[in-house]
Amino acid sequence: MAGVLVVGGDRVGEIESLLQDKGFRNVYHVSGRKKSDVKATIPADTELVLVFINFVSHSLSKNIKKLAKQKHVPIVFCRRSCDAVAMYQPAIG
């Protein structure tokens, strides 16, 4: 089961549907609004981390980037838009 972690933004509504159409079964979301979000972890089945750059703090971004590197999970930084997500072509088998 492929999962994707979305970091940033209050809601992921239409973007979640787009990601599921691309083959991601589980869409996890961390809004980045709470102080405790800096300590967010990456779920075990995550195959991609998607960070919306205009909705996260530098410390959250740095922590997620470090965790993704440790787990060898690709990370994509983009603006929060369906167009940016639609352009991503995952390599899911």
Image (cartoon, rainbow, N blue to C red):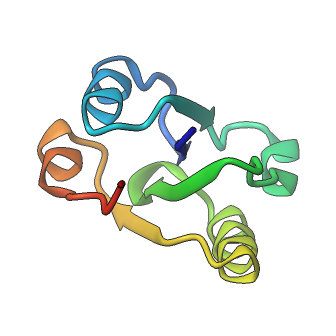
Q: Residue at x 68, y 47 (%)?
A: 45
The image position of residue 59, as x and y in percent, is 72, 69
- Rendered view: 10 above or below 24: above
Instruction: Name which quarter of the figure residue 35 lies in.
Output: top right
Q: Quadrant of the C terminus?
A: bottom left
Asked where in the image residue 79 lies, by quadrant, the reply is bottom left
Residue 54 percent across, percent down from the top left: 40, 54
Image quarter in which the N terminus is found: top right
Residue at image location 75% in from the left, 72% down from the top = 67
Give whichever of 40, 54 is nearer the camera: 40
Image position of 40 (left or right of 19)? right
Report which quarter residue 65 is drawn in. Answer: bottom right
Q: Residue furthest front?
A: 93
Residue 77 percent coordinates (x, y)? 39, 66
Residue at the image position 81 percent from the left and 53 percent from the top: 41
Query: 42 or 25: which is nearer to us?
Result: 25
1 left or right, relative to 14? right
Give the residue at the far top of this rendering. Answer: 13
- Residue at screen point 33% across, 35% down: 19
Q: 63 or 21: nearer the eye? A: 21
Q: Is residue 50 above or below residue 27?
A: below
Count the marks.
Answer: 0
